[in-house]
Image (cartoon, rainbow, N blue to C red):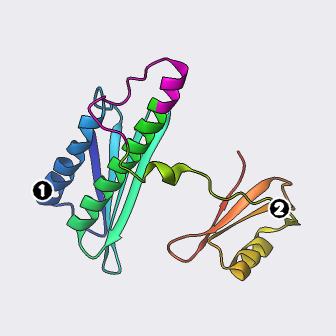
Amino acid sequence: MNYKVRGQNIEVTDALLDYVEKKLSRLERYFEAPPTSDVNVTLSVIRDLHIVEVTIPLTGLLLRAEHRSKDMYSSIDSVVDKLERQIRKHKTKVNRKFRQSGSADHLFSDEVTQLPAGEEDMLEVVRTKRFTLKPMDVEEAILQMNMIGHNFFVFSNSESKEVNVVYRRNDGRYGLIEQG
């Protein structure tokens, strides 16, 4: 895998670069052939928090993980653990799908075992909600979201007549997801 490591508000030292590459190289064992796309790694420091973001674009799949902690090396370790869990979950899902259809997938290596007990249950839908979308503008949707105390809110945008989602970002500001 090719690593593109960049720093924001931090100098990426040779020691940090070596540590990132060593830890992320653990992920190569999960693939039949190492991904040819670049692995994007962003190391940043914001208000004494060390943030590591890793994005691995694959064919038909995007693996992404982020972790924040007081220690950069701890954040790197946690991100790699999160990516390993994502790969195992996806591999289990792919294997289950292809066992049912009778074909094979060669994106992931067969060396990796199934999901640990309990993690497979996390993919199960345990509750379904139905509700009518009230047409409203973005500001009203943000107010509604804050009123009910959620981190996101689905609504019918009165301007575009499309279904949108507003959400609270980690920095305390708001984001909007629109249909493409």
Q: Secondary structure at mark 1?
A: helix
Asked whether residue 94 is in view, the answer is yes
- Give the camera-side residue of 33 and 121: 121
Q: Secondary structure at mark 2?
A: loop
- Give the camera-side residue of 158 and 95: 95
| Disc sitting over residue 14 in the figure | 1
Seen in the picture, residue 46 relative to 35 is either above or below; the reply is below
Seen in the picture, residue 174 relative to 65 is either above or below; the reply is below
Residue found farthest to the top: 103
**Left or right relative to 45: residue 137:** right
Residue 92 lies in the magenta stretch: no
In which quarter of the view is residue 78 placed?
bottom left
The first of marks 1 and 2 along the sequence is 1
Q: Main structural element of the magenta stretch: helix, strand or loop?
A: loop
Mark 2 lies on residue: 131
Q: Position of residue 42 (x, y in %)?
A: 33, 57
The amino acid type of the residue labelled 2 equals Phe
Write the start and end of the magenta stretch as one range.
Answer: 96-114
The amino acid type of the residue labelled 1 equals Asp
Seen in the picture, residue 169 relative to 127 is either above or below; the reply is below
Name the residue: 71% across, 57% down.
128
In which quarter of the view is residue 34 placed?
top left
In which quarter of the view is residue 143 placed?
bottom right
User: What is the quadrant of the N terminus in the image?
Assistant: top left
Name the residue: 30% across, 32% down.
31
Q: Position of residue 123 (x, y in %)?
A: 53, 50
